[in-house]
């Protein structure tokens, strides 16, 4: 029982790291980026290549996944995404679906369609018993890492200069520009951060979520649930939503395996009917 | 143009009537479609596929092009129709036209029930709810194996001759004719709908819901109605697929179908009904060609095409239809020019 709760929390934390980049692009920059999962997949595959082909340590793979994915993100933002900030949502949806299709086919071409496996370092494998609760070492690692990331992110958004610049740029881009904030650079950096976090999440999730070319489509719904249910105006909303989703999903799969997915989709639709702007929408927010 | 200058309302009525008039290229399109029965007897199966995809895209055009609702889960109705038609033929009555009507009614009812979900919220909320509904149905079809065959698909569907007269043959000739007739009938009905005052009010809502409401056009009821109609259309398209292939796979509810039909509509252009049909022709031919060149990776090129379309701008690509002889836009341009000349 408590083990399930623990696994659920780990899963939820992972989902949060994967999805918080999306909550930034979608919520703050108002860009419907369905290709977010593709960045996560890129992070996962970077880990797989580095570990299985070059035999590098798992701990090196995590920052590498973050940096490389952030770099890809910034490249795409500068070349393609930037042109679509002002477009209609339909255009953004089509564009990002196109990107997803391309990434799926490209990964299939280079890496093959099979499930990718990595072997974790020995100290992260297995479980230990803690007052009768079975705790997976790797899941504990994920929880600690993700919690640290979340706190850092929250502080970065609320306490740093960059955070205030970002919030200003989002609230009113024109005024922010007038005050001498380079909105375009702020957005590019934010996008890089979001994709980098997705890449990191993908790297961390290779073991738990599995990794194959269909990853972006398979987990798209989860990311979108986190963001839409959590609301798009803060970090706390998606965080709580991700935790709830993680726990509900793990518990649902364990107790009622037949109905697991129904519950999640059903709850999502219900929340969207009752609170179209998410559970934790800011008053008067956009 | 008449000698004396027309009053504004007369001009407006004239323009509206012109928009609803039959165009040369429309008639030509249908004639070509009929001629295909004799010209390309070996390609009947792919032509049937185009026809079904075209009908599916027309149904999406009704809600996207006329009501402005972006749906990521339109395949929910397509899949529902396919399953209803398949199960109906397997367990109850295997005459296809009846099955088609049943599938249309069931999908329409489901569309009516879910239409209330798309009334509220922003584009994003709509995307998510439509997507969620489709995923829910896909999960249901997968789990209810006793009814739908689960992941293996619904097999054992036997279809008796259409109206007891025309049997589905091996080459798919009657299947194509059947699908084409359905597409024609439904397109004609859709044409009537979108050119009626009701269709015009939908366009007004799409442009500006607040202003439409101020003019006394209630968006709620109209959107519910068009969503129901579009759902019934999609259900009939799905039923056609189930009947012409005698098989329903869980793939009919997969996400890529919703994405494909959006792509089809974007290639062909939204908001003039035939976009779905032109798009279906281009898309199917393209996919066929790509899957011959790169059997496994055609998805890459489809994705690339999508990105290019968005980057270039869909309006610029679909503007070609304005240059077709007698098209509504060309006529409108001509009329405007003439009006300026008079002045």
Image (tube, rainbow, N blue to C red):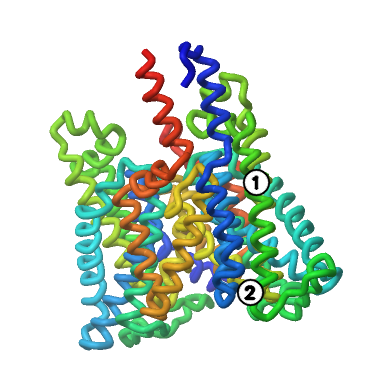
Q: Residue at x 34, y 67 (%)?
A: A40
Residue B76 located left or right of residue B322: right
Can you tell which mark lies on residue B249?
2
Q: Quadrant of the C terminus of chain A?
A: top left
Residue A41 located left or right of residue B125: left
Q: Quadrant of the N terminus of chain A?
A: bottom right
Residue B338 position (above or below residue A30) = above
- Check disc 1: other Cα within 10 Å, few if <14, some if 14-19, many if 20+: few
Residue A162 position (above or below residue A134) = above
Residue B284 position (above or below residue B209) = below
- Give whichever of B106, B123 is nearer the camera: B106
Q: Quadrant of residue B10?
A: top right
Total numbered labels: 2
Residue A257 located left or right of residue A231: right
Q: Chain of mark 1?
A: B
Residue B342 place in picture, x, y as percent? 38, 15
Q: Residue at x 39, y 43 (%)?
A: B323
Q: Chain of mark 2?
A: B
Answer yes or no: is residue A274 visible: yes
- Check disc 2: other Cα within 10 Å, few if <14, some if 14-19, many if 20+: many
């Amino acid at each position: 029982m408590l083990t399930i709760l623990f696994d659920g929390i780990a899963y939820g934390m992972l989902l949060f790291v994967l999805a918080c980049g999306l909550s930034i692009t979608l919520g703050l920059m108002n860009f419907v980026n369905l290709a977010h999962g593709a960045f996560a997949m890129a992070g996962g595959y970077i880990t797989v290549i580095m570990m299985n082909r070059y035999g590098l340590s798992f701990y090196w793979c995590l920052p590498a996944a973050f940096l490389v994915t952030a770099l890809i993100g910034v490249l795409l933002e500068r070349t393609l995404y930037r042109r679509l900030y002002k477009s209609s949502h339909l255009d953004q949806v089509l564009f990002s679906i196109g990107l997803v299709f391309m990434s799926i086919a490209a990964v299939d071409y280079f890496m093959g369609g099979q499930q990718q496996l990595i072997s974790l370092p020995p100290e992260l494998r297995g479980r230990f018993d803690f007052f009768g609760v079975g705790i997976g070492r790797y899941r504990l690692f994920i929880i600690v890492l993700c919690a640290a990331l979340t706190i850092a992110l929250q502080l970065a958004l609320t306490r740093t200069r960059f955070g205030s610049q970002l919030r200003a740029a989002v609230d009113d881009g024109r005024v922010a520009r007038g005050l001498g904030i380079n909105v375009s650079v702020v957005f590019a950096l934010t996008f890089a951060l979001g994709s980098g976090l997705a890449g990191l999440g993908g790297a961390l999730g290779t073991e738990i979520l599995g990794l194959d070319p269909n990853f972006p489509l398979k987990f798209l719904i989860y990311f979108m649930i986190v963001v839409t249910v959590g609301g798009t105006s803060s970090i706390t909303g998606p965080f709580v939503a991700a935790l709830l989703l993680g726990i509900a999903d793990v518990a649902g799969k364990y107790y009622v395996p037949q109905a697991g997915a129904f519950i999640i989709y059903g709850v999502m639709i219900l929340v969207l009917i009752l609170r179209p702007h998410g559970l934790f929408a800011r008053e008067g927010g956009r | 143009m008449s000698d004396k200058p027309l009053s504004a309302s007369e001009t407006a009525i004239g323009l509206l009537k012109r928009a609803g008039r039959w165009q040369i290229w429309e008639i030509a399109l249908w004639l070509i479609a009929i001629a295909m029965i004799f010209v390309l007897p070996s390609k009947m199966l792919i032509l049937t596929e185009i026809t079904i995809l075209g009908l599916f895209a027309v149904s999406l055009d009704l809600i996207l092009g006329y009501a402005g609702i972006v749906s990521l889960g339109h395949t929910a109705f397509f899949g529902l129709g396919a399953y209803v038609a398949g199960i109906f033929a397997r367990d109850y009555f295997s005459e296809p036209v009846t099955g088609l009507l049943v599938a249309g009614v069931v999908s329409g009812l489901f569309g009516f029930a879910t239409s209330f979900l798309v009334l509220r919220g922003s584009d994003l909320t709509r995307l998510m709810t439509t997507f969620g509904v489709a995923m829910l149905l896909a999960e249901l079809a997968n789990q209810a194996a006793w009814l739908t065959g689960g992941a293996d698909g619904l097999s054992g569907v036997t279809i008796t001759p259409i109206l007891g007269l025309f049997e589905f043959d091996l080459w798919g000739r009657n299947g194509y004719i059947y699908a084409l007739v359905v597409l024609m009938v439904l397109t004609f009905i859709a044409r009537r709908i979108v050119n009626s005052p009701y269709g015009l009010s939908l366009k007004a809502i799409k442009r500006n819901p607040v202003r439409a409401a101020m003019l006394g056009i209630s968006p709620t009821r109209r959107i519910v109605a068009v969503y129901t109609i579009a759902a019934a259309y999609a259900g009939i398209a799905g039923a056609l697929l189930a009947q012409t292939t005698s098989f329903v796979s869980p793939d009919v509810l997969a996400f890529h179908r919703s994405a494909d039909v959006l792509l089809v509509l974007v290639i062909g252009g939204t908001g003039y009904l035939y976009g779905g049909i032109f798009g279906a022709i281009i898309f199917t031919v393209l996919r066929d060609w790509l899957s011959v060149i790169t059997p496994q990776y055609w998805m890459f090129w489809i994705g690339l095409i999508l990105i290019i379309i968005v980057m270039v701008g869909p309006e610029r690509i679909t503007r070609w239809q304005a240059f077709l002889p007698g098209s509504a836009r060309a006529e409108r341009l001509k009329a405007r020019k003439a009006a300026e000349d008079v002045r």
